[in-house]
């Protein structure tokens, strides 16, 4: 369990990596050698973890890919989470967002039931849909969606003056601390990433959008770096599907190593 941002920074320095690998096991892209259905997803994810855990500090299973299979999918997810080494953070990409007792039950299900270290949360119902997650204390991280990398972010997140994403960043900091709260800030709009860093200088950002969505590591580091790195850069498709064949785990490792090497260069240049 990575209990606070200092411990997270120490893990980053130890591995010379601030890589988060998204586990989005699409059954239409999993190599045939893994098998089919839930069993194929489980084998695929476990082999990805085995091939990459020494060069990544976090894994981010996307719950939708497992929940579509009901109880069997959830059971596979539990086994995958248990398979991830303790030195790696497990981020449940659930994007939960509800109030009061409902939010508390979501938090309990994912922190205690699944064993996740962190949960992505949608903040648009306000404080009482976030605090039940941050209330779990040390070693449990709440990751608040602020500025996402998708095209549709333009519909609401930039609305208003100041834009809504800025208000989320400013307001939500009162609901947690830099030791138990991060923000999702996408890589595809570097100018706004820099603005997010100005508004939340101490918090870690989980940054999607590098690679397949067009964001670059160089732009992310330039815009979002802080004295403790402050970044977990997520890559999913570029690593998971580096090969469609039985060598998928080997090729995934090569893709992860390429990113890790670039990250190590960034760390050496700034420490």
Image (spheres, rainbow, N blue to C red):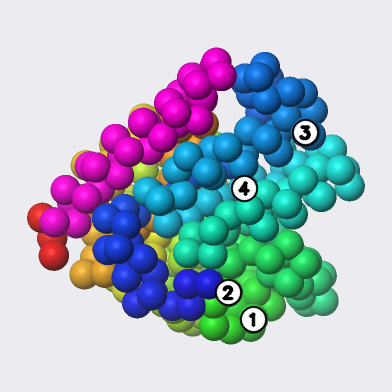
Q: Are marks 2 and 1 in contact (CB under 8 Å)?
A: yes
Q: Residues within 10 Å of mark 4 (few under 14, many from 20)?
A: many
Q: Mark 3 and mark 2: span between their CA atoms? A: 29 Å
State the image quarter where residue 197 is shown. Answer: bottom left
Residue 12 shown left or right of residue 261 in the figure: right
Q: Does 167 appear above or below 192? A: below
Q: Is residue 28 left or right of residue 230?
A: right
N-terminal-most mark, 1 or 3: 3
The residue drawn where x is 29% and y is 35% is 258
Residue receiving disc 4: 61
* Viewer-nearest residue: 161 or 136: 136
Q: Residue lying furthest right in this view?
A: 71
Residue 140's disc is: 2
Q: Pointer 3: what residue?
A: 39
Query: What element does badge 1 sit on?
Result: loop
Q: CA distance from mark 1 to mark 3?
A: 32 Å
Q: Are marks 3 and 4 in contact (CB under 8 Å)?
A: no
Give how far across and how far down residue 218 sits, in percent: 21, 42
- Tell me what residue is drawn at x 67 percent, y 49 percent: 80
> Which quarter of the rendered picture does the C terminus lie within?
bottom left
Q: Label 1 belongs to which residue?
A: 136
Range of residues picked out in magenta: 241-268
Secondary element at tag 3: helix
What secondary structure do most residues of the magenta stretch adopt?
A: helix
Name the residue nearer the viewer: 234 or 222: 234
Q: Earlier in the sequence, mark 3 or mark 4?
A: 3
Q: Position of residue 147 (x, y in %)?
A: 45, 52
Residue at 54% in and 58% down: 85
Secondary structure, mark 4, is strand
Q: CA distance from mark 4 to mark 1?
A: 20 Å
């Amino acid at each position: 369990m990575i209990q606070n941002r200092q411990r997270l920074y120490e893990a980053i320095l130890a591995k010379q990596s601030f890589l988060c690998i998204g586990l989005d096991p699409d059954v239409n892209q999993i190599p045939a050698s893994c098998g089919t259905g839930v069993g194929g997803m489980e084998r695929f994810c476990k082999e990805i973890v085995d091939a990459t855990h020494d060069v990544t500090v976090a894994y981010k299973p996307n719950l939708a890919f497992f929940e579509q299979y009901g109880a069997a999918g959830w059971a596979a997810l539990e086994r995958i989470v248990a398979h991830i080494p303790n030195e790696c953070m497990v981020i449940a990409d659930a994007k939960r967002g509800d109030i009061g007792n409902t939010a508390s039950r979501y938090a309990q299900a994912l922190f205690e039931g699944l064993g996740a270290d962190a949960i992505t949360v949608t903040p648009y119902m306000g404080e009482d849909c976030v605090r039940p997650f941050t209330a779990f204390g040390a070693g449990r991280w709440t990751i608040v969606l602020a500025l996402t990398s998708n095209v549709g972010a333009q519909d609401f997140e930039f609305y208003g003056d100041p834009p809504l994403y800025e208000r989320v960043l400013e307001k939500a900091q009162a609901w947690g601390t830099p030791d138990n709260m991060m923000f999702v800030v996408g890589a595809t709009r570097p100018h706004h990433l820099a603005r997010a860093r100005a508004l939340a200088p101490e918090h870690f950002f989980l940054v999607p959008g590098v690679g397949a969505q067009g964001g670059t590591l160089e732009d992310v580091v330039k815009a979002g770096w802080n004295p403790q790195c402050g970044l977990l850069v997520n890559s999913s498709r570029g690593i998971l599907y580096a090969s469609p064949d039985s060598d998928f785990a080997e090729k995934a490792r090569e893709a992860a190593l390429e990113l890790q090497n670039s990250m190590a260069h960034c760390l050496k240049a700034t420490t």
